[in-house]
Image (tube, rainbow, N blue to C red):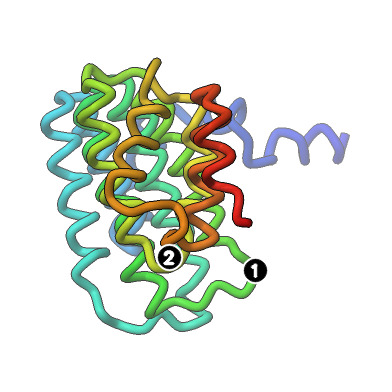
């Protein structure tokens, strides 16, 4: 009998549904007043019901705040930051991506740019922040596949991001994003990178990226050029 009562008190989806919409709404409002992240998430979910433009505007506000902050993230605040980042990533990739892939793709670029500012103010001993951004790179690939943007436009933007990356993040990110590349995009991106600088001037991370792109483009000569002597 006690076991049956315990199962009815377990916090799970089935039991919470039994509380009813009105009771759940009251509980969420109570939580939202105490927890800014919860309130922000609820606002985004409501914006998604209105339309992609409204959701994009809510995401933009949060990304701007995250990018503008210069405060050091303490170890106590790091878990909260990781949750916040992952919520933004999922809202862009899943919620906004389902409504408008082009709007979502533009926001995912901005999200990935946050890695630079966060790298200087938040330690990441377990690589948890890095994991969020690697997942975002995989999401970027899926959004590329779903977007209406042309391969040459996408390749141009990505080449600039790769060449300005001082922390070799794109060497990991490109591998995660590659499955979503449009036909011809790997070759286009590789050509743009080679036009910027010859392979013997590239960093090890750039050479790795070139090999990944050459392999995806089935270009043996380009792969050989990216192998150091």
Secondary element type, mark 1: loop
Q: Earlier in the sequence, mark 2 or mark 1?
A: 2
> In the image, which disc is placed on residue 74?
none
For the residues carrying marks 2 and 1, which lies nearer the camera in this image?
A: 1
Q: Position of residue 151 (x, y in %)?
A: 28, 23
- Residue at the spot 51% in from the left edge and 78% down from the top edge: 123
- Residue at the spot 45% in from the left edge and 24% down from the top edge: 180
- Closest to the observer, 36 or 52: 52
- The residue that mark 2 highlights is 81
Can residue 30 be seen here? The reply is: no
Residue 107 sits in quarter = top left
| Quadrant in which the N terminus is drawn | top right
Q: Relative to 179, does residue 162 appear above or below in the rendering?
A: below
Residue 192 sits in quarter = top left
- Residue at the spot 23% in from the left edge and 33% down from the top edge: 46
Q: Position of residue 3 (x, y in %)?
A: 86, 37
Secondary element type, mark 2: helix
Q: Name the residue at the front extreme.
A: 229
- Residue at the spot 38% in from the left edge and 52% down from the top edge: 198
Mark 1: few/some/many CA within 10 Å (<14, 14-19, 20+): few
- The residue that mark 1 highlights is 126
Q: CA distance from mark 2 to mark 1?
A: 14 Å
- Closest to the observer, 10 or 99: 99
């Amino acid at each position: 009998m006690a076991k049956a009562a315990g199962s009815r008190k377990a916090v799970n989806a089935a039991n919470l549904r039994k509380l009813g919409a009105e009771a759940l709404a009251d509980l969420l409002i109570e939580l939202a007043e105490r927890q800014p992240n919860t309130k922000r998430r609820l606002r985004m979910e409501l914006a998604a019901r209105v339309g992609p433009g409204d959701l994009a505007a809510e995401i933009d506000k949060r990304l701007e705040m995250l990018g503008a902050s210069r405060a050091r993230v303490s170890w106590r605040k790091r878990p909260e930051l990781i949750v916040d980042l992952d919520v933004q990533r999922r809202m862009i990739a899943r919620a906004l991506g389902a409504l408008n892939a082009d709007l979502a793709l533009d926001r995912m670029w901005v999200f990935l740019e946050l890695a630079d500012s966060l790298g200087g103010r938040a330690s990441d001993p377990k690589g948890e922040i890095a994991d969020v951004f690697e997942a975002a790179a995989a999401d970027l690939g899926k959004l590329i596949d779903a977007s209406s943007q042309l391969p040459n436009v996408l390749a141009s933007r990505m080449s600039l991001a790769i060449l300005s990356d001082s922390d070799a993040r794109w060497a990991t990110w490109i591998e995660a994003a590659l499955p979503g590349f449009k036909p011809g995009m790997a070759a286009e991106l590789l050509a743009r990178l080679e036009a910027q600088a010859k392979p013997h001037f590239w960093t090890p991370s750039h050479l790795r990226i070139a090999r990944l792109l050459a392999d995806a483009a089935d270009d043996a000569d380009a792969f050989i050029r990216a192998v150091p002597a």
